[in-house]
Amino acid sequence: MSDSVRLSLCMIVKNEADCIARCLESAGPLVDEIIVVDTGSTDGTDAICRSLGAKVFSFRWNDDFSEARNYSLSLAQGEWILWLDADEEIEASPDELRELTASEAYDLYSFRLNNYYGARADRNQVITIAHPRLFRNRIGFRFHQRIHETLNVEEVLPGPDQKERIGSAPITIWHYGYLDDYVKKKGKAERNLSLLKEEVAKNENDPWLHYHLAAEYYRAQKFNLSFQHVNRSIILFILANQTPPSLLYKLKYSILLSMRSFEGAYPAIEKAIALYPDYVDLIFYKAVILLHLDKPLEAIGALDRCLEIGEQNLKHLTQKGLGSFQAWYCKGLCYEKLNDLETAERCYRNALALTPNHSEAEAALVRLKRDSN
């Protein structure tokens, strides 16, 4: 290993000509080498990568994301590895990365992963979570699972070592891959569903596989199938004597809200909140449910709790706005229902003060003004 290579960027790509330059231009200045494993591009992705300083290696695609990623790790010369996807960009300075990799305190760092959703990249439309992205090379880290691959953190850092050796850093990654056009263009839903069904057929008692199936069906608006699989996932975690992760409950109640099954969601959501009392998304969902059940005063109490918690707890998958501007907007709806239009107007203006392009709050103010004339 070369002493001069402290940090390697490792990526796998296929037909990413429309986004790979953005990714590499953001990450290239931060690293000492760029390792790109190409799994069969035909659109010139490999040439773009080489033009931006990457070492490009071919790998025959075999429907296994982990194998391709582990091949990229085997090629890295660096003492540390940063991994990214082609549809991402990273916000950081070379000094920030240099400080992290110079430290002996941790073996792995999580960054803030912001997932765009919807029709366009809007920084107020993101779902955020802490995600492990930077790790020390040659101590055993590898990816596992064919799809929705994850690092083998539990194997490398078992038990109490996880808390002691895993750090978090104020570095942000922006992920474009769940925007509507990206999903349609890449055919991600069909590919993911096919691979996940194959994996479930092999191991029908893996709770994570059922969660990922539920998430794919949810994005495809097949809510009944999504609900079946998220419930199966929750049950399998419980049968394994594990508390189901918080994001399962977020998905479950997102499904029920999408199906407008408010009576089915309440008061059951209280049990999920009891497990995760600091999860702002669940408390916001509770407020929405209460509002639809014509309980605006109770909904206001839940929304006040959302504003108190805020959105900085990255251990949960958190939608931006539910602890800030969306909570204020929803409070406005509650006060409208209570016929307290003056307070409702203040709530809408608070939402707009935080997010000036909040179209629903703007429309609400227009409605209030029209109705008062």
Image (cartoon, grey):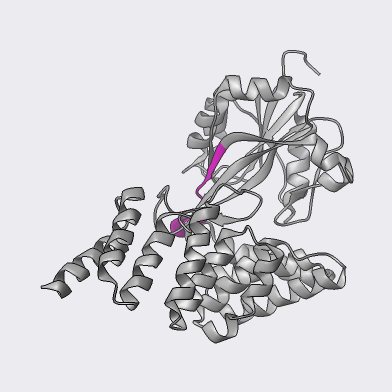
Residue 85 relative to residue 158: left or right: left
Of 359 and 140, nearer the camera is: 359
* Residue at x 61%, y 80% (from the top left corner): 267
Quarter of the picture containing the C terminus is: bottom left
Query: Where does residue 137 sit, x and y in percent of width and height?
Result: 80, 30
Quarter of the picture containing the N terminus is: top right
> Which quadrant would residue 268 be assigned to in this image?
bottom right
Reply yes or no: does residue 19 show up in magenta: no
* Residue at x 59%, y 73% (from the top left corner): 253
Q: Which residues are the magenta region?
A: 172-181
Task: Judge whether 101 appears above or below 306 on screen.
Answer: above
Task: Judge whether 133 appears above or below 296 on screen.
Answer: above
Work out which residue is located at the far bottom of the displayed protein and give it.
263
Residue 363 relative to residue 112: left or right: left
Of 206 and 306, nearer the camera is: 306
Query: Where does residue 276 sit, x and y in percent of width and height?
Result: 68, 62
> Which quadrant would residue 134 be assigned to in this image?
top right
Query: Where does residue 39 sit, x and y in percent of width and height?
Result: 66, 45
Task: Judge whether 346 appears above or below 232 on screen.
Answer: above
> Which quadrant would residue 59 be assigned to in this image?
top right
* Residue at x 43%, y 83% (from the top left corner): 294
How many marks the image carries: the answer is 0
Residue 126 relative to residue 154: left or right: left
Would residue 194 be seen by someone viewing this image from the given angle? no
